[in-house]
Image (tube, grey):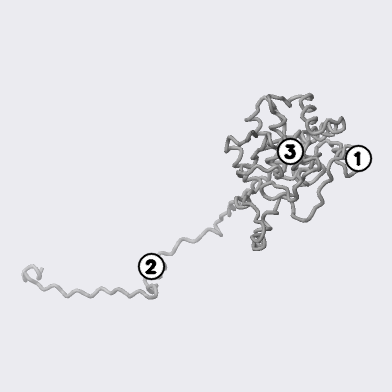
Amino acid sequence: MGIQVRWHTTLIVVPLLAAAGFAATASAPAPSGAAADLEPAHTAAVRNVGVLPAEPATPQAMRNPSAAAGDPTDPLSQTPPAMPGDGFAILGDGPLAIPELVFYAYRAAEMQLAINSPECGLPWHLLAAIGRLESNHADNGRTDVLGTLAASRTTPDGRVGPMQLPADVWERFPSDGNVDGVTDPQNVFDATLAAGAWACADGASARDEAGEARVAAMFDPSPEYLANVQKWSAAYKKGAEVAPAAPAVPPTAVPTPPVVQIPTTDAAAPAAPDTDAEQATEETTPAAPGLPMMTIPELPEMPCLVPTLCEQ
């Protein structure tokens, strides 16, 4: 019976899905038969949208241990460049660049394995080195938004997916690395987590050089493969450690206008206000337009009720 490897914390899933730009509708199965002919063109296009542009790309050739030495198409002939002092960026452009979504798959598997198999200590850069040699990081990131390969990978001997897992290994460790409810060996999240579960099974450790060699030999026991995995793993580890980060842009401060002091002299001193002129202005200022002018009627003269007092 296969072991279903599941996420155990939403703290890992939520930022992962947000950073990779996942779309919930993309997890629907592709239609087949007559239904496929009726599928809107824009819906079909969504399934092929990945992190990288969707232009056609030739998948990397499968590894061929018996190929002639120096064959540029054989991944075993492709080694990382010498690392300069400031390193290479892991995300972006450059010889150590990993497609963003595929990079998240390696890191997500590392974090989940730290929960499932804490004694193993399998690092993401070792998984990345194996993924580099097995499929050139999922055909250089040609996946849909959930991480499934645009073109499935299956070798004549039955190895499947971007990590080229043996068929019996996938049957033992079917994994749902992107938590979409589907286990698919052609999905980079599922395949990477399954590869890690295989490498960490039965309490095995990958914390030292011997553990790293053991994991590499599970995919290919040849000395050439081990040497190349170690080179790529070390390059990715160093590149992630020393690659310069994007400089932070300081906030733009709004300058406060200076206060200009105007010197005062007797000649330029302001004149005292003319109160008589202001009063005259107030008396002659017409009312605001549209408002009626208020007039107070004159009161009649009070009659003299006590003549004696009026004469005084």
Distance, label 1 to label 3, CA atoms, is 24 Å
Q: Earlier in the sequence, mark 2 or mark 1?
A: 1
Residue drawn at x 9%, y 72% as measured from the top left: 304
Residue 167 tag number: 3
Looking at this view, is 39 or 114 the one in front?
39
Across and down, in percent, residue 142 comes to 75, 49
Classify the position of the N terminus by image quarter: top right
* Residue type at numbered disc 3: Ala
Secondary structure under badge 1? Answer: loop
Residue 279 tag number: 2
Across and down, in percent, residue 156 comes to 81, 43
- Name the quadrant containing residue 197: top right
Secondary structure under badge 3? Answer: helix
- In the picture of the structure, the residue carrying the numbered disc 1 is 67
Q: Is residue 300 above or below residue 104?
A: below
Point out the frontmost of discs 1 and 3: 3
* Residue type at numbered disc 2: Gln
Point out the frontmost of discs 2 and 3: 3
Looking at this view, is 89 or 280 the one in front?
89
Marks counted in the figure total 3
* Residue type at numbered disc 1: Ala
Would you say 110 lies left or right of 271 here? right
Looking at this view, is 273 or 45 the one in front?
45
Q: Earlier in the sequence, mark 2 or mark 3?
A: 3
